[in-house]
Image (cartoon, grey):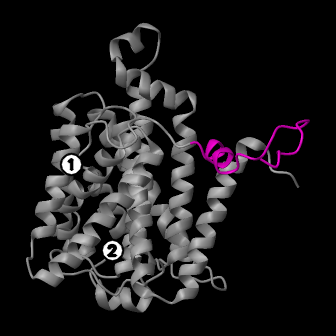
Amino acid sequence: MRVPLPARGPVLAVAGVSVIVALLQLSGLAFWQGLAVNLAIFVILVVSLNLASGFTGVFSLGHIGFMALGAYISAILSLPLREKGDYLPNLPPWLAGIHLDQMLGPIPVGWLLATLLAGLLVAGVALLVGAVLMRLSGHFVAVATLGFLVIVRVLLFNFDDFTRGSRTFSNVTPYTNLWWAAACAVLVVYVVWRLKRSSYGRAMFAQRRDRWAAQSVGISVLTPRLIAFVVSAFFTAIAGSLFAHFITSFSPTVFYFDLTFRVITMLVVGGMGSVSGSVIGVGVVLAIAEGLRRVEDSTLLYGLSGILLAAFFISVIIFRPEGIMGQREISLNSLMATLRPWRKAPGDGPPSAG
C-alpha cells in the first residue's frame, strides 16, 4: 500500500520514534530509558503550554496546576482496592470502591481509563476557569493563572483525605513506560500540529496578532482562546498521569514554581507558536541541564547548573527573543526530499554518473 505524500513525513516520524524506543528498550540502560520518559513527558507539557500560550498570546503561569490535578486524580483512581483502604482510609464511599487497576493481558486498561477520566475532569475545570480568565489579556491573565496554581497547591495541601496533604503520596503503580510515554507524546504533538493548521488554529493566531482586527472581520476572541486552554489542560493532565505513574511517589511541592519555570524556559527557547520548536526546546534544555549536572557532580559546585541555565535563558531572551524556531515548523516531507536529493520527478532520466 502506497502512503500518500502528505502522510509520509508523519509516518516516517512515527517509525523513527518506534525504532528509537525499541532500541532503548532492548539496551536495558535504565538511565537513558528514564531520561527518554522524562523527555516525552516534558514534550507533552511544553507542546500543551504552547497551544494555550504560544498560539493565542495568553500567557499562562498556572498549567502545572492542571498537571498536579491529573497526577492525583489518576493515582487515586488506579490504586488497588486493598491499598486504597489502607492508604486513604477516609475517602468517601463512592470513591473508595473505585479501583481502576485492571489489566487486559499486558495492557493496563484500568490505568488508561483513569488517565482519560483525569484528563476529562481537568478539562472540565479548565472550561470553568477559562470561561472567566480567557476574557483577560496581558499581565492580567498571567497573574490570574498564577493565582489558580496557588489555589491548586493550597487545596492539595489541605485535602488530607484525598491527597494525604503535605505527606508523600506513594504506592502508585508504575504503569508508565517508554512505549506509553512515547505514544502519548507523538499523539499530542500530532493533534496540536493539526490543530495549528485548522480554522481554529488560524483564528488563534489571528487574534494573537491583532485582536481588534480579528474581531472586525468576525473572528471571535474568546472561543479560540477557550478551546486552546481546555485542550491544553486535557493534555497537561495526561502528562500528570504519566508523571505520577513513572516516579510513583510525589507531593504537592513538586508541582510549583520550579517545574513551572522549567517548562516556560523550554517553551521560550524552542519558540512560542512552533510545535517542532517545542520539541527542540525540550531536547536542548534537557541536554544542557544533564550536562551541567554532570559538571556539578565532578566539580562539587552544586547550584552551578541552575545559575548557568538561568544565564542561558536570559541570553535567549536578549539575543533571540523569538526562540530557535519562532513560529516556523520543520516540514518532514521537505526534510525527506533534502535527505534524498537524487530522487527525481516521474519522467526524468536516471541521475548522471557525474
- Quick check: 124 left or right of 158? right
Q: How crowded is mark 1: few (under 14 residues within 10 Å), some or many (20 or more)?
A: many
Q: What element carries label 1?
A: helix
Q: Where 138 sits versus 12, above or below?
A: above
Does the magenta run of residues contain 333? Answer: yes
Q: Name the residue under label 2.
A: 92
Amino acid type at circle 1 is Phe
The image shows a total of numbered marks equal to 2
Foreground residue among 294 and 176: 294
| Res. 307 image quadrant | bottom left
Amino acid type at circle 2 is Pro
Foreground residue among 86 and 289: 289
Q: Give the range drawn in magenta.
A: 331-354
The percent position of residue 67, horizontal first and vertical second, equals: 33, 60
Q: Where 273 sits versus 18, above or below?
A: above
The percent position of residue 309, horizontal first and vertical second, equals: 18, 59
